[in-house]
Amino acid sequence: SAKNVAELAESCKQATDLLGNFTDSLGARRSELRGRESLPGCHAYPAFVAWLSLNASAEDAALALTVSLRTWGDSFAALARGLRSHPGFPAIGAPEQASAFFDVFDLPDEGLETKALAIVQEAQDAGRRPDQALSYARMLDSYQGMFWNTLVEEARGAGGRGGGLGGRGGGPGGDSGE
């Protein structure tokens, strides 16, 4: 529902400051990062989440997002563990502060599944079934993969733009198709 997407957006807003801590720990200048071109492959996932909030039935969106957010959180948890175990991370500051951004998305939302089940039950009571949830969940999974693969490609210097942060598919530490 739009309310659940708004709650997710608030979490993302809170994470913005923590992302600044992460970039600071890498020695990156925030002013330089603000001027960087956005990576299209990183926009597909949030754009589809927005599309779901406007166009999907509440029951389909609730089920698809519940599965997707768990996978998203697992990817961020893997990234945080990898960063903390990497020698030399962070270049500046404490590892916990530098990687706290990734922990925000790893925290389980205890009420998320309960909310999703209530939405589905309400729909069933009204005679509706979540007939697109599986398709939407698969699309979200693909868009997550695109996000991570875009970051990987950017980090490897794909497209002749040099190194940096970027990815598409597979998640951190996952199969990037190579």
Image (cartoon, grey):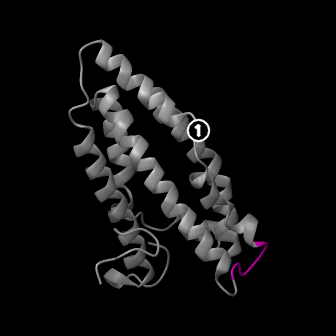
Give whichever of 69, 20 is nearer the camera. 69
Residues shaded magenta = 89-94
| Residue 26 visible somewhere in the drawing | no
Give whichever of 117, 50 is nearer the camera. 117
Task: Give the image quarter of residue 92.
Answer: bottom right
Q: Pinpoint residue 13: horizontal percent, then vertical percent.
A: 60, 45
Q: Look at the picture and state if 64 lies above or below 156.
A: above
Q: In this view, does 62 lie to the left or right of 107?
A: left
Q: Look at the picture and state if 109 lies above or below 141.
A: above
Look at 35% across and 76% down and name the residue there. Answer: 175
Look at 35% across and 47% down and name the residue there. Answer: 47
Q: Looking at the picture, which amino acid does disc 1 mark?
A: Glu
For disc 1, the marked residue is 110
The reply to whether the magenta stretch includes residue 170 is: no
Q: Pinpoint residue 85: horizontal percent, then vertical percent.
A: 66, 80
Q: Look at the picture and state if 27 lies above or below 80.
A: below
Task: Give the image quarter of residue 79.
Answer: bottom right
Q: Look at the picture and state if 81 lies above or below 63.
A: below
Q: Pinpoint residue 63: horizontal percent, then vertical percent.
A: 36, 37
Q: Main secondary structure of the magenta part?
A: loop
Q: In which quarter of the image is the C terminus?
A: bottom left
Give whichever of 174, 2 is nearer the camera. 174
The reply to whether the magenta stretch includes residue 91 is: yes
Task: Give the image quarter of residue 24.
Answer: bottom right
Q: In this view, does 67 lie to the left or right of 98?
A: left
Find numbered disc 1 in the image and state the secondary structure of the residue it sits on.
loop
Q: Is residue 43 left or right of residue 128?
A: right
Look at 52% across and 40% down and name the residue there. Answer: 8
Q: In which quarter of the image is the N terminus?
A: top left
